[in-house]
Image (cartoon, rainbow, N blue to C red):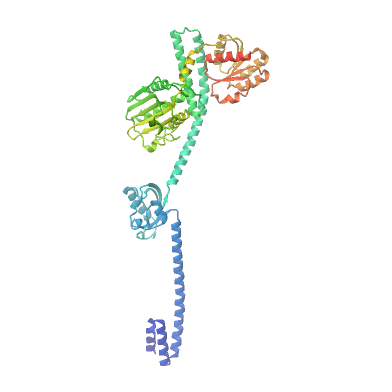
Amino acid sequence: METRLAENLSVAIGPWKKILDAIIENAVKHHDYILFFTVISSLTGVVLLSRSNYHKHCLYKQSLKFNEKKFSAITQASPVGICMVKKRKIYWTNETLHAMFGYDHEDLLGKSTAMFYADDATYQKIGNELYSAHSTMQPFRSTSKCIKKDGTAFHCSLRSCPLNALDHSEGFIVVIWDITEMLTVEEENIRLKDHIIQNQRMEAIGILSSGIAHDFNNILFPITGYVEILLMDTVQDSKSHMYLMNILKASDRAKKLIGQILSFSRQTQCETTQVLVQHIIRETLALLRETIPATINIVEQIDMNCSPIMADPTQIHQIIMNLCTNAYQAMENTGGTLSVALHETNTDENTFLHYLELQPGRYLQLLISDTGVGMEKEIALKIFEPYFTTKKTGKGTGLGLSVVHGIVKKAGGDIKVISEPGKGASFHIYLPVLELYREARSLSADEENHHMKGKGHILIVDDEEQIVLMEKEFIQRLGYDSTASTSSVKALEIFQANPDAFDLVITDLTMPGLTGNDLALEIEKINPDIPLIICTGSEKKYQKEVMHSANVKELLLKPLKMEELSRLIAKTINERS
């Protein structure tokens, strides 16, 4: 019996059909029906069990194929580059990585990841950081500059993780994200933030400058006024007359300096007039010679017969000062030569029109050049952009050249820079000249300058006692009667007591109690025929508001010339008569 069972079991290694045939044959031959049913029952269970395992195997294979397809779809649709590396060699990549670096699939397989980096030092650095990070089982993160197939550099964020945390020899999956645009946006946000901060600083400077200008002009006004009174009693060719005229010139420069500060800090509207640029250049260079290092030589070639341009003198001074300052700063450490040249030229020549945005005509050409460090072409293209600067923090605001560019363009001219590293820089400025200058100059030369006298009663109002005393003395010298007050409230009471006694009111604008504008409105209610002249130590930003009062004839900025005031007084009183 045991022998037959062993024989029956021995055939179990054959195919299922042969096994069943052998069992049936042996069972019939030996009439062993118990063995037959025992074996058949066992085999039936084995078949059922095998069928169940086979079904599970098929489901597992289907799930595995689905996951592979899903993984492939995710990686190929991913906006970031993905690759698998083993021993820093690439053996799988997605399509995004191909597009990112510009390589085909075949170009990358089996190649070293060194092809992604700008130099070997960066490649080694990333490798050291990668294996150091994974040795502590931490995911690796880093940023680096990478190189495309065509040599273009871009910034990447790198992240990697081992496929098997316990066995790094199986390789890593690496995710590469192009962050160039993100860094550009961040830099732009930083620039805009700095821009806002700079604007806030400029606004604060503007407010401070306005207050300083008001006080400074009020200080200058009695100085210039008393000088003009002394000039009325001084012989013209005397030394005293010369000294007093020098005081007036110095005071006028101080007034223009305040105007320049206001113009720079608050971008005020500037008044244009005929300007001889050659004289401004000479004055500016004389000032610079006292301030720049002795290692810098100034060479000037100025045509003193150049025609004038229509511009604001303060802004022309600003152009020259900014460009010359930049030039000497470029040579501050090494020394060199600062060259300034001025002459007239005609832009009809082809050599000018092909790179200048100018209408054909006659222009002043101002050339300011240095022998300093120079600059790259990429920087030269950006230097006129607001807030762009290559100087260290605290050395510059990035406003100087953008302001120069704006002034030149507003005047109908153009500015270009020519520079190379190590070869200095040359700024070429073109400004249109006035064609009818000679006629205008001859007319102004024929005018006679003198103080105009007259008759009438003038009410003087200013909270600065020195100004009131000076104006009263000057007006009386012109032949007018005057009543003066340092209080606008008291002045209104004086006017209310006898409104027909006065022919003109001269008042300050900014005063405690009643402002000059308020005083004008109150006087208009009492006697609308009385004209007013309002003086202010601040810029003329109030002009439209003040001129709403019909009896305000003029708004003057201190310190005003007394000759101008005498003409305006005579004109105003005569018009009323």
Whole-percent x, y for residue 268 in the image: 51, 27
Quadrant assignment, res 394: top left
Query: Which quadrant: the C terminus?
Result: top right
Image coordinates of residue 195 in percent, x first then y, are 47, 36
Q: Position of residue 120 (x, y in %)?
A: 31, 49
Position above or below: 472 against 151: above
Residue 384 place in picture, x, y as percent: 43, 34
Nearest the camera: 552 or 577?
577
Up the image or down, 77 lies above or below 270; here it is: below
The one of 304 and 482 positioned closer to us in this rendering: 304
How many marks can you see?
0
Can the viewer see residue 540 in this picture? Answer: yes
Say left or right for 475 vs 86: right
Q: Can I make out residue 90 in this image?
A: no
Q: Quadrant of the N terminus?
A: bottom left
- Residue 334 vertical placement versus 240 (above, below): below
